[in-house]
Amino acid sequence: MRLVLTVWKNRISPVADSARQILVVDAGNNMILDRRTESFESESVFHRAKMIADLGAEIFICGAISDFFSSLLEGNGIRLISFICGEVEEVLCAYFGNSLHCPEFMMKGYFKP
């Protein structure tokens, strides 16, 4: 499985549309097998969505994200987990521990319907 997370200073980037870097994580059996950082080459959400899809991302974890960018990602079959905040390592542990839905990882002011 391949996860992609927006990152900024070891935290989830607060806005996916303006993130400069992503962390690409390959995982299997609830373990991280490999990870690497990539930079976005373009500010266009079209190019960003294509890059994420071309990386083979299955899951995209981010902070706030525009409806348009999220539609592009979901249109490429990528599962979106948005409005997440926190330290990258803690978010990864929570994802693999099935506790990413806990309030401490939800952006302030965001209430999931």
Image: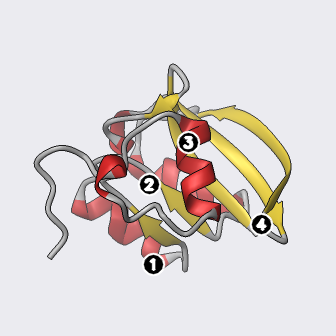
Q: Which residue sits at x=38%, y=65%?
A: 101
Q: Which mark is residue 46?
A: 2
Measure the C-alpha gap from mark 2 to mark 1. Answer: 12 Å
What's under tag 1, amino acid-wise? Gly
Measure the C-alpha gap from mark 3 to mark 1. Answer: 28 Å
Quick one: SS at disc 3? helix
Q: Earlier in the sequence, mark 3 or mark 1?
A: 1
Quick one: SS at disc 2? helix
Q: Earlier in the sequence, mark 1 or mark 4?
A: 4
Residue 50, relative to residue 92: is it above or below?
below
Q: Nearer the viewer, mark 2 or mark 1?
A: 1
Which residue bears the numbered disc 3? 90
Q: Which residue sits at x=78%, y=37%?
A: 36
Q: Is residue 4 left or right of residue 111?
A: right
Q: Which residue sits at x=14%, y=62%?
A: 111
Q: Earlier in the sequence, mark 2 or mark 1?
A: 2
Measure the C-alpha gap from mark 1 to mark 4. Answer: 26 Å
Which residue bears the numbered disc 1? 75
- Which color scheme did the rendering employ for the protein? secondary structure
Label 3 Cα neighbours within 10 Å, binned few <14 / some 14-19 / many ≥20:
some
Q: Quadrant of the C terminus?
A: bottom left
Q: Position of residue 44 (x, y in %)?
A: 41, 43
What's under tag 4, amino acid-wise? Asn
Which residue bears the numbered disc 4? 30
